[in-house]
Amino acid sequence: MSILETRETTLETDPDQASRPRRDRHIFTGLRSLGTRLLSAVGVIWAAATFTFLIQSLLPGDRATLLLNQLNGQIQERTAAELAPINEKYGFTDPLIVQYFRFLGDLATGNLGTSYQLHKPVIEVIGDQIAPTIVLTFTSLLIAWAICIVVIVGTAKRNRFFSSVASGLEALAAGLPQYWLGVILLVVFALNLGLFPVVGGTGIGGLLLPALTLGIPLAGFLGQVIRTEFESGMDQPFALTARMRGMGDTGVRLRHVLRHSVLPGITLSGWALGSLFSAAVIAESIFTRPGLGKVLVTAVNSRDLPVVCGIVILVAVIYVVANLLVDVAYTLIDPRLKTS
Amino acid sequence: MTVLVEKPVSAPAASANRTLLAVHALNVSFAVGTGRHQKINHVVKNVSLELSAGRCLAIVGESGSGKSVTARTLVGLPGRNAIIEATRLEVANRNALTLSERLWRQVRGKDIGFILQDALVSLDPLRPVGKEIEEALRLHGWGNAASRRRKAIELLDSVGVPQPEMRSRQRPDELSGGLRQRALIASAIALDPALVIADEPTTALDVTVQAQVLDLLAAMKARGTGIILISHDLSVVSRLADDVAVMRGGAIVEQGPVREVLGNPQHEYTRALLDAVPSAHTKGTPLTKEGRSGIIATSDRARRVRAANAGPVLEARGLGKSYDGPDGVRRKVVHDVSFNLAAGETLGIVGESGSGKSTTAKLAPDTGEVLLDGQPWSSLSTSQRRPRRRRVTVVYQDPLSSFDPRWNAERILVDALDHRDFSTAQTRSNRVAELAGQVGLQVEHLEKHPLQLSGGQRQRLAIARALAPEPEVIVLDEAVSALDVSVQAQVLDLLTNLQAQLGLSYLFISHDLGVIHHMSDRVLVMKDGKAVEQGTADQIFNEPAHPYTQELLASLPRLEITENTTRSINA
């Protein structure tokens, strides 16, 4: 028995007694905070849905006329007799509040309405096209993280010249507009060098250029916030302690400092996932890639409101899910957040 | 169970006198800037040190004296752009001047262990402490994952961590200050290095925990480990070290056995350093030579205060304060604390971290009440209190964070003045000059921004700001704790002189028992939110009644002063 042990135990509360009720309390607070988060997630989606409902019903122009004209590809005034069956079918003449609750009820059962143009349920229209967009979004996010971690671990706090060049490039990349970058990549790598197909399919070859178009500017954004954290992390005493026990520079960077520096990048990724979804519209049209972007553009042009609203709600859901993922990632990376 | 890690058989006891460290004429400089603007800063000048097994060499000095750079040079990590020159630099039987980074990495952790202060940030805050110890073993190819795991638990046990298995899975923030400092030590001595360098190993710790960590280091020394102790605290040094080197401005000014250097200091700087340590002996005397001449004529107000000798200026009755914890449980951090503060008096509040002393001094309780001059204070609403707010001001430990970094010192002081009393620019600038004079700031300091001022100047500025509204009570919350001992001595002398001159009352909070004894007329000892003992300073320090006060005083490392010590000021 150590001579010092007895003394310490008098100052510490006995952990066996102290930890058990504490653990129960942790589970309780954990469940409560999960509940609060889910509730606020539902709140956000409800707000987005209400907003889209109001847009649908309050925009100028009669919806039945719009619907009928799209069915026939004509633009003309319709008589009341023509409109009556449409109004009947969609319930456009019901009081607004009744329509609203019907809309919410449909939403809860996954029914987002029927496309005016394609005469298919909106959920099906989105479902057909969502896969390539999701693949593109996540690939871009991965590419962005890969670029910025390689660059930062390689250059931050190393050689003054390389680290200032790298941070300059990050600022430049963060400022690049995606539509410009996309066109440049397309011209250089697909047209001039012929390394990639000009009209992208859904294969790997067609994925890389659009993903780079979205990933490079994001890498710049992520790089700027992560670099600052990384550099201050390199000066922390625990990094010095790791060196003092014989760890090399690369080890300190990868095993200790990196984990501390990614947190602001994780926060940013929550926002980025949603924003990439909307930026995908640009990349998809430049590289003529199938995906939700094309669906959205067509729907907006033809005033296919149910589809537009369906995509708006979908983007809201994606933001909410992304932010829940960010919260989970946060507590995995920094376990201190769980208890405090 | 073993007290410490078992020595490998290959290290025979006969090697007790072998030399672990031989440094001759070490110079370290740093190149600052590039090209034409490059400057060379000489940080360590002509330092020679020697250490053999089972001994402890202390390097003492104030911040900026080059002691930490010296220590880090000994493990090949002096910092970026360092230029190292020495006629001899032998560490653990290797010529450190020619070691490549790859070879250094084999030495660090295996032959030399390094302990930094404050394990809360010196251990990776995101990882369990056991993982950090396992990492030290893994880096030198020790055993496999399972045996490293067992060894880490053994090591925690050997440094006196109870329930090592459970503790090894906890992160530094889940451990108490003493336990995590032990875990840090365990990670540094995992491979039983012959030489251990401890850079301010107890600076962030409470006095009772500090005593435990010093005992642990002493046990390591007794087993034959050579220790280099870097410290600014002379009492810690006198407790552990065999030899001491006093550094100032990068050079060693005095060196030799602890008893000789501290007991009979030859160099003027060593003497000044010893004199500057506040303790029982220094009570009622200035700590610096300048301190004596600082007393200016007593003001009318001070004379009035003394003549009136009326009731207490500040009266606290049954203060209590609770906070909601992160788990939603309400915790009471201050229980039923009462005290009086008379005009012109200093009440010291002493206790370890978390004892509720700062919360008490906020004078904003949930229950109980605070009276100022017999009038209600804590029960007032914010707007009612505002006109009287100027009568109680505060100085904090870290003044830097309490200043707007973009304002210069003059603007900071002008801002603290009541513009109804000083309505013209002329009266304001006169008052600022007067305040600066009172705290010993020069005119050129007023132009500077907080970041450009030294620690002592910043604290003087904070005191001047606290004086600006002519308060009756100043709350000094660890106001000298972050300062070097000689700067601390100057600030303490300044506070004493100001009190005599202006008749101020101080509520003086500190964890440092020496400072408290030196400054206080009366002392309040706090533990776990309760006032355990209250009395005059001499009562508390000479005849402590409460067991906790006794424990606190027993763990205080005292500067061993032998008969031939001469205190230059008293002499």
Image (cartoon, coloured by chain):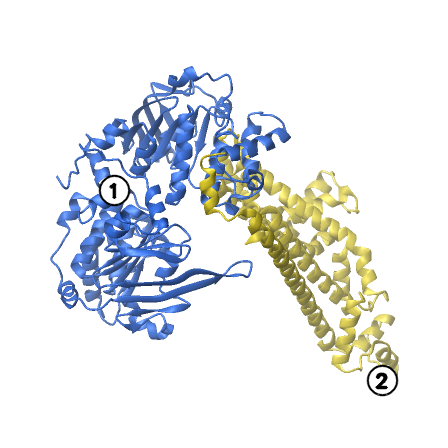
> What is the x, y in percent for residue B70?
36, 29
- Would you say B3 lies left or right of B387 here? right
Is A125 situated above or below B375? above
Q: Nearer the viewer, residue A314 or B461?
A: B461
> Can you tell which of label 2 and label 1 is closer to the viewer?
1
Is B20 situated above or below A238? above
Q: Which mark is residue B231?
A: none
The amino acid type found where label 2 is placed reads: Ala
Which picture quadrant has residue B525? Answer: bottom left
Q: Residue at x 44, y 23 (%)?
A: B194
Which picture quadrant has residue B131? Answer: top right
Q: Colour of chain A?
A: yellow
Q: Nearer the viewer, residue A184 or B165?
A: B165
The residue that mark 2 highlights is A80
Secondary structure under tag 1 reads: loop
- Would you say A148 lies left or right of B400 here? right
The residue that mark 1 highlights is B277
The amino acid type found where label 1 is placed reads: Val
Secondary structure under tag 2 reads: helix
Q: Residue furthest left?
A: B297
Q: Residue at x 79, y 60 (%)?
A: A126
Q: Who's blue, chain-wise?
A: B
